[in-house]
Amino acid sequence: MLDYTEKIRDIAGRLLKDCQVEMVIGFRRGSMPMMSEPCTVTRADQVDQLVWDSNCGINLANYLTGRTEKIAVIAKGCDSRNIVNHIIENKIKREQLVIIGVPCKGMIDKRRIRSAAPGEVTEVVEEASVITVRGNGFEQTYDRNEILQQNCTVCTHRNPVIFDEMVAEPVEEQQNVDRYEDVRAIEAMGAQEKWDFFDNLLAPCVRCYACRNACPLCYCPTCFVDESMPQWVGKSQNPVDVRTFHFLRAYHCAGRCTDCGACERACPVGINMRLLTKKLEKDAFDQWGWEAGLTVDQRPPLDTYRPNDPDDFIK
């Protein structure tokens, strides 16, 4: 994916020079290894900042909510699906966007690399399918496919579903991937086993809300956890409050989540809260054959009201 950088710069420079957009939202090199960071470029002479590598995991759709400018945005598969969500939910207009599509081969899991390294990681070099990690007195080499983020290993929509320009030919989509193996394992547990599992899963949570802030679907002006009139959930580390936050946030993403992994990637204590949203994603697929963000022509099942709904509960 390293060869995408020059093409991204060429497209971004042309769009800005021709005044087709007012800004380009993309990535630049971060100050720490494995931390490419979002940035905005507003002039053609700034496009040399833009990069693309296996550390561009942050979902750039998060930066489109409520914007009024004409914007070019770089979008991999999951980004593009969240852009579709934003268009459907009237958070931005399609005509405001020039979507620069990036075929994705997966993002590396920086937490897994740091935990395996014998010391502080000072340099990470990516060459084709090989990742080399260096630090004080050590050097380790990985096959990038073995250190991908969990969501990337089961992704079946690596190519953008909506775009105006592509930086490369589409990559081959993964086939015969079991996206919900971990969910089914939890479904098979008994009631007490499930209770203990989720207690242990959420116990490290410090209520920093990094998962919420990183999620491109969490754009409410006031989150339910911040409401005081009435107060829906407490601010303490009480396990009930912690569970209430995570479970309700997951339900707010039901039928909308694209499993981009932004929540898990942002969590400072490594909680896999994707298990919650994946369960709801699985239910939406099993009941309605629905996958979020694949088309702007159809609204999500839980966002649809039909007066003639055959189910009695709607009366």
Image (cartoon, rainbow, N blue to C red):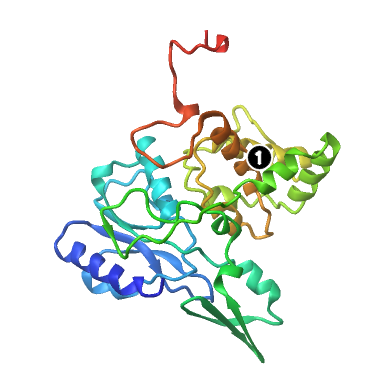
Residue 103: percent from the left, percent from the top? 39, 61
264 or 127: nearer the viewer: 127
Residue 148: percent from the left, percent from the top? 57, 65
Q: Residues within 10 Å of mark 1 (few under 14, many from 20)?
A: many
State the image quarter where residue 95 is shown.
Answer: top left
Residue that protrudes farthest toward the right in the picture: 192
Residue at horizontal 83 percent and vertical 36 percent from the top: 190
Residue that protrudes farthest toward the bottom in the picture: 137
243 lies above or below 113:
above
153 or 30: nearer the viewer: 153
Residue at horizontal 50 percent and vertical 75 percent from the top: 129
User: Which element carries disc 1, helix, strand or loop?
Assistant: helix
| Quadrant into which the N terminus falls | bottom left
Q: Is residue 52 left or right of residue 136?
A: left
Residue that protrudes farthest toward the front in the picture: 176
Q: Is residue 12 left or right of residue 283?
A: left
Q: Is residue 43 visible?
A: no
Q: Is residue 147 left or right of residue 25?
A: right
73 or 289: nearer the viewer: 289
288 lies above or below 19:
above
Q: Which residue is mark 1?
A: 245
Residue type at the position of mark 1: Phe
State the image quarter where residue 276 is shown.
Answer: top right
Residue 32: percent from the left, percent from the top? 53, 75
> How many marks are shown on the rendered structure?
1
Residue 110: percent from the left, percent from the top? 59, 69
Q: Is residue 88 visible?
A: yes
Residue at horizontal 54 percent and vertical 76 percent from the top: 33
